[in-house]
Amino acid sequence: MIRTNNISFSYKEFEKPEELNTDDLELVFAARETAINAYAPYSKFKVGAAVRLESGIIVCGTNVENAAYPSSICAERSAFSNSVSNHHNDKPVAIAIAAMTEDGLTNEPVPPCGNCRQVIAEEESRTGNQIRIILSGKNKTMVIDSISSLLPLQFNKKI
Ligand SMILES: [Zn+2]
């Protein structure tokens, strides 16, 4: 017997980041400010990620590119490398991601790449916490409750 299944998810969309709660708005601004520090001489696409930990601490990361392209790292993984390295037992509860080109902040929200989705999934698995994902562009901001929405049927240690 063949069964056809469907996977769907809900997320919240905000026209302006100012409609977010105070914590999430602060996280979006932290991601935007951090993006300025990105080292992106090749793509000219600067990304900032800000992770909020349970204690309230915000840990940031940017993309850091390399002439040997595969040696580059994304902002999201920079931020989680930072939080795991420096605040090992302080569990992440949310991550905000923002990106800019030479023209400024992107119009649309920029979602995490496949590698970063896998890393966020590992963090949820490691800590047992869902991590809220906040994607913010000029035109809209999206809030997704967990990486399982963006990475369904994920590979993890439970398999
Ligand atoms: Zn990535």
Image (cartoon, helix red, strand yellow):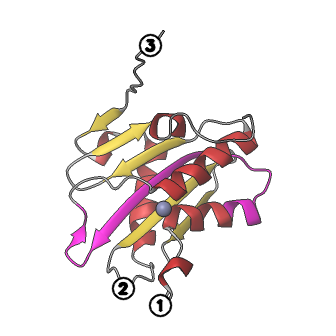
**Spatial CA span between label 1 and label 3:** 47 Å
Image marks 1 and 2: residues in contact by CB distance under 8 Å: yes
Q: Is residue 97 magenta?
A: yes
CB-based contact (under 8 Å), mark 1 and mark 3: no
As measured in the structure, the alpha-carbon distance from the residue carrying label 3 to the one carrying label 2 is 46 Å
Near mark 3 (Cα within 10 A), the count class, few <14, some 14-19 or many ≥20, is: few
- The mark found on residue 42 in the picture is 2
**Magenta stretch?**
83-106
Residue, disc 3: 3
Q: Earlier in the sequence, mark 1 or mark 2?
A: 2
SS for callout 2: loop
Residue 121, how many percent across, how many down? 61, 44
Q: Does residue 52 appear in this view?
A: yes
Image quadrant where one finds the C terminus: top right
| Closer mark to the observer between disc 1 and disc 3 | 3
As drawn, 33 above or below 151: below
Amino acid carrying label 2: it is Tyr
Residue 144, x across and y down, in percent: 43, 37
Q: Which residue is mark 1?
A: 67
* Upstream in sequence: badge 3 or badge 2: 3
Label drawn at residue 24:
none
Q: Is mark 2 within 8 Å of ligand 1?
A: no
Q: CA distance from mark 1 to mark 2?
A: 8 Å
Amino acid found under the numbered disc labelled 1: Ala
Q: Nearer the viewer, residue 86 or 29?
A: 86
Q: Is residue 92 visible?
A: no
